[in-house]
Amino acid sequence: MADTSKAPTHAPRALWRIGRGRSGGSLGCAVIARHAIGLGRKVLVADGDINNPMLSRIYPPNGPHGVERPADATLETCKVWLADTLALALKKNASVVIDMGGGDRISEELAAESDLGHFLAASNLIPTYAYFTGPERDDFEHMHRIWSSGAFQGGTSLLFLNAGLQRNASRAVDPFEWLREDSRMLAMFEAGVIPIDMPALTAMKYIEEEGLTVFEAIANKTGQSGRPLNPLWVHMAQKWLKDFTTNLTKEGADEWMP
């Protein structure tokens, strides 16, 4: 049974995924939403990622937490969808997790046009900006450009360091060692950005080959082959979720998450 003891006093939040496509943002958002829903909070999950409908598969539009997806990937369509989604969250007095996929330009433009951070705060929908990066320099530079633009203001900013995007096969060393000493990252920390380690799920390839989501793998669901998933992949997915959730909680997730 969900623990609803904190739900009445927790202010609604708008969690905004920021980062390149295939940066692990959709998976991170799914875990955050799952944890918040488990706490008994009212949460909408808005999947605006046209290329990767992972979130809408886990939280379908016709379900209790789903939101209709945008009709296409054009800038104007997505902007209207984004505005309508925020209006729906305000109407329902619910938190909302928004995943625009790789469409950061849509979020940036809307944020610049509407003074978004102040609008959300004034509407009692406090923003949480979730930046995702892998250990490659171009991943970080893309994310840092958006952060340093100042388009996303107010609320809480998080930086998810996704070890699963490491291109080097060796896991013996910290793939983010260079970044933890980078002056740009240190400046983000000084500005209050919260770093969160996102572990690598090395079994993800085999889970996806069976057409399963991580949560379906954790629940030991049968894949598209009709055979049970390898027990080792199930175990690795379960451990990954436990470790990632521990990292979220350690960094105060119950306060800043939806």
Image (cartoon, grey):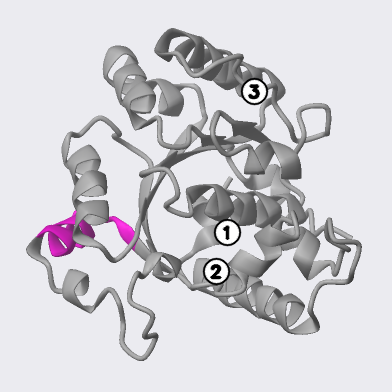
- Residue 186 in the image, given as x and y percentages of width and height: 15, 64
**Tag 2–tag 1 contact (CB < 8 Å):** yes
- Residue 4 in the image, given as x and y percentages of width and height: 79, 53
- Kindly identify the amino acid type of the residue bearing the numbered disc 3: Arg
From which residue to which does the magenta span run? 184-194
Q: CA distance from mark 2 to mark 1?
A: 7 Å
Task: Tell me the element at label 2.
Answer: helix
Horizontal side of 100 relative to 189 (left or right) equals right
- Kindly identify the amino acid type of the residue bearing the numbered disc 1: Asp
| Residue underneath mark 3 | 69
Mark 2 Cα shell of 10 Å, populated few (<14), some (14-19), many (≥20): some
- Seen as rendered, the residue at the extreme front is 225
Q: Single out the mark in the foreground, 1 or 3.
A: 3
| Residue underneath mark 2 | 249
The answer to whether residue 173 is above or below residue 109 is below
Q: Quadrant of the N terminus?
A: bottom right
Q: Choose top left, top right, bottom left or bottom right for residue 160.
A: bottom left
- Along the viewing direction, whichever of 5 and 239 lies nearer the viewer: 239
| Residue underneath mark 1 | 254
